[in-house]
Amino acid sequence: MMRKIAGLTDTARLKINVFPATVLVFVILYALGFSGILPANVMRYLLQIFLYIALGEAWNLMSGFAGMTSLGQQLYVGLAGYAAAILTGIYMQPLPTVLPAAALVCVIAAIPVSAILFRMQGMYFAVATWVAAEAAEKLFLNWKFVGQGSGMTIRLSPYPSVGVIYLLALTVCMLAVLTVYRITRSRLGMGLLAMRDDPVAAASIGLNLTRTRLTVYLLAALISGLAGSVFFLNKGMIYPESGFSISWTVSVVFVCIIGGAGTVAGPVIGAVIYVLLREYLAHYPGWSNIMLGAITLLVIFFFPEGIAGALKKKKRIN
Amino acid sequence: MTDRGAEKILSFENVTAGYGRSDVLNGLSFEVERGEVFGIIGPNGSGKTTMLNTLTGLLRPKSGRILLDGEDISRLPVDARCRRGIGRTFQIPRPFIRMTVFENVLVSGIYGAGFSAAEGKGPAEDVLRFTGLYEKRDLKSGELTLLDRKRLEIARAIVSKPRLLLLDEVAAGLTGSEIETVIGMVVQLKRAGFTVVWIEHILETMLKAADRLMCMAEGRCAVIGVPGEVLASGEVEELYLGTETEALKHAAR
Ligand SMILES: Nc1ncnc2c1ncn2[C@@H]1O[C@H](COP(=O)(O)OP(=O)(O)OP(=O)(O)O)[C@@H](O)[C@H]1O
Ligand SMILES: [Mg+2]
């Protein structure tokens, strides 16, 4: 009986409660950003959180909703970082063109890459995404134009302040959350869940697997690229090892698993925990990876659907 | 039983297909007429499911043509064939296990018939009532029993109103009264205008619901005709050597 009342009505109730609350939070965060009352170090924490949320939503869209587990989204983080460095350092482009152009570079690059990756599925697909990112790292390490191993600096004058970068990160975060939220409530969102559960049956009910996978892959590349360009704008420089590092995937998987893969709220919760925890663990060098690993295992053991999943369940039982 | 000169909806023309290098279908040819229930029997491994996979596009024929209302569909991808009006069930049910029963059917209507979520709600509820799943519509489909999973297969296949409905052993593993229910459903679907291709080992279902019956053997059409005559034929008897033959004769009487 209980379960019957859950289901659709439950999501309907969530929709009513969560959406205005989310909008309110974004309004407050924008107001804080524009007012200039936040200290710089607080803004730096927050913008990290925003960017991990965006990366988490992108990964979640692919891996959590569509069942296309990726270990290689750093390909687009690094690519966007380099695009930002090249556009500003070599072509002297101003800030407003940099972010959209960097994202566009990612989407354009994602088309041929997807053509290769989509020949594989499941674990092979996951490993292939990683290999693609590794290949990009090797390419940039040997490419004179981008400074090889010594990397590139992002040159803008005046260089955007923390406040500006905060607002950019917040905007990217908001775009990511709203996009994924909209998708989960759309025709495409249902298709993704069907595809994740059974691609053969999904094709048999009329779903175009290639088109659906491509849509998701390009969207994830776009969001990861936007986040990546702001990340490196904040850092000021990029190296092949920092741009294309597997540690991006490690962090993002942590964010999604802790928060809850396959939910929109999951990466939000996960990113907050991740950034705070990382700061805290920085005081205990050497322990940080062990602790992150232990926490991941504990969460997988006690809340297999992440914190967002556990909260949802609790709400349903009440 | 069948009208003379009835319209062909489906033709298999000399189709060869298989997995890897070995062929399962060896020059299969047959035709299905619009509005009929076309039954298919045949020993295990005779290629019935393989025929269905070739028809729906999971398998590409190595040679031959498959015509749906005169159009050669044998090179189209799976989803395009669905949107051309081919709906199927899977012999081993393949529900979207983390979605509810209702969502399973809705998503099929959305992609197969191009419904919006709002347009799809009514038809989805209708087919859930028709298949007896309405009360269970909010259950996760992974929690369903075998019988209900088979019902869900039917519901998901008919919500888009396919012009050709393919049923692969939907009655297998069910009890006597459940089989009667399935027969009733198919008869109703036929009345509603569906053309049905129904693969089933349970001969009673074929006698009661099929207009014509094909017996497959080694990837070919061995016998085709009115169900009673096909089941009584010597060839079918030979194919089903052993205890089953007595049952066959009995059923055919
Ligand atoms: N995916 C596959 N890969 C390789 N061989 C297969 C595959 N599916 C079926 N076969 C083989 O093809 C032949 C025909 O199988 P098919 O499933 O079409 O038979 P069927 O007539 O549906 O039998 P049943 O009555 O048992 O359902 C069998 O020899 C089977 O082993
Ligand atoms: Mg079979």
Image (cartoon, coloured by chain):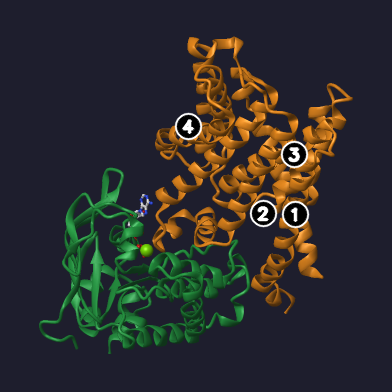
Chain colours: A orange, B green
Calculate the distance from the C-alpha at mark 4 to the C-alpha at mark 1. 33 Å
Task: Give the residue number, with chain letter if any, for mark 1.
Answer: A308
How crowded pointer 1 is (Cα within 10 Å; few <14, some 14-19, many 20+) is rated as: many
B247 left or right of A284? left
Q: Quadrant of residue B74?
A: bottom left
Residue A304 visible to an observer of this rendering: no
Calculate the distance from the C-alpha at mark 3 to the C-alpha at mark 1. 17 Å
Q: Is residue A171 above or below residue A83?
A: below
Task: Give the residue number, with chain letter if any, for mark 4.
Answer: A105
- Residue B2 image position (x, y, % from top left): 18, 85
Q: Is residue B121 above or below residue B12?
A: below
| Mark 4 or mark 2: whose residue is earlier in sequence | 4
Q: Are marks 4 and 1 on the same chain?
A: yes
Residue B157 is labelled as: none
| Mark 4 or mark 3: whose residue is earlier in sequence | 3
- Residue A187 image position (x, y, % from top left): 50, 62
Asked if labels 1 and 2 touch by Cβ distance under 8 angstroms, the answer is: yes
**Chain letter of disc 3?**
A
Residue A49 is labelled as: 3
| Mark 3 or mark 1: whose residue is earlier in sequence | 3
Q: Are marks 2 and 1 on the same chain?
A: yes
How crowded pointer 2 is (Cα within 10 Å; few <14, some 14-19, many 20+) is rated as: many
Q: Residue at x 25, y 67 (%)?
A: B216
Asked if labels 3 and 4 touch by Cβ distance under 8 angstroms, the answer is: no
| Mark 1: amino acid | Ala
Asked if labels 1 and 3 touch by Cβ distance under 8 angstroms, the answer is: no
| Mark 2 or mark 3: whose residue is earlier in sequence | 3
Residue A293 visible to an observer of this rendering: yes
